[in-house]
Image (cartoon, rainbow, N blue to C red):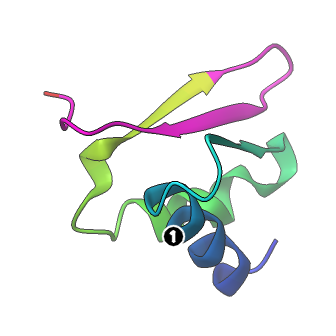
Amino acid sequence: MDKEQAFRMLESLKNREVEEIFVARQDFMNFREVLVKRDDFKHFRGIAQRGGDVIYQYMDDPRS
């Protein structure tokens, strides 16, 4: 996964085009690099899966 693809995935999640996105273990670090630079970073919730994969959801209220 490249940074542009990660950005597009996050935008589609934010815009409610999808309910959640799946990030495979091998793509996590590239994805996270894009995620943490966003102003709305705290609106994204990552749910760890067995094996190191993560499912992300977008929340209306930012997490604390």
Q: Is residue 24 left or right of residue 15?
A: right
Near-viewer residue (17 or 30): 17
Name the residue furthest top: 50
Q: Is residue 35 left or right of residue 6?
A: left
Question: Which image quadrant is residue 22 in?
Answer: top right
Q: Is residue 20 left or right of residue 22?
A: left
Residue 29 x %, y %: 65, 56
Near-viewer residue (16 or 58): 16
Name the residue furthest left: 64
Mark 1 falls on what kind of element? helix
Residue 18 x %, y %: 65, 51
Name the residue furthest front: 17
Which stretch did the figure color magenta? Answer: 48-63
Name the residue furthest bottom: 4
Residue 23 x %, y %: 76, 46
Relative to 5, residue 36 above or below? above
Which residue shows up at 44% across the image and 59% down it? 14
Which residue shows up at 58% across the image and 65% down it? 12
Q: Is residue 9 left or right of residue 40?
A: right
> Main SS of the magenta segment?
loop
Quadrant location of the C terminus in the rendered image = top left
Q: Which residue is mark 1?
A: 11
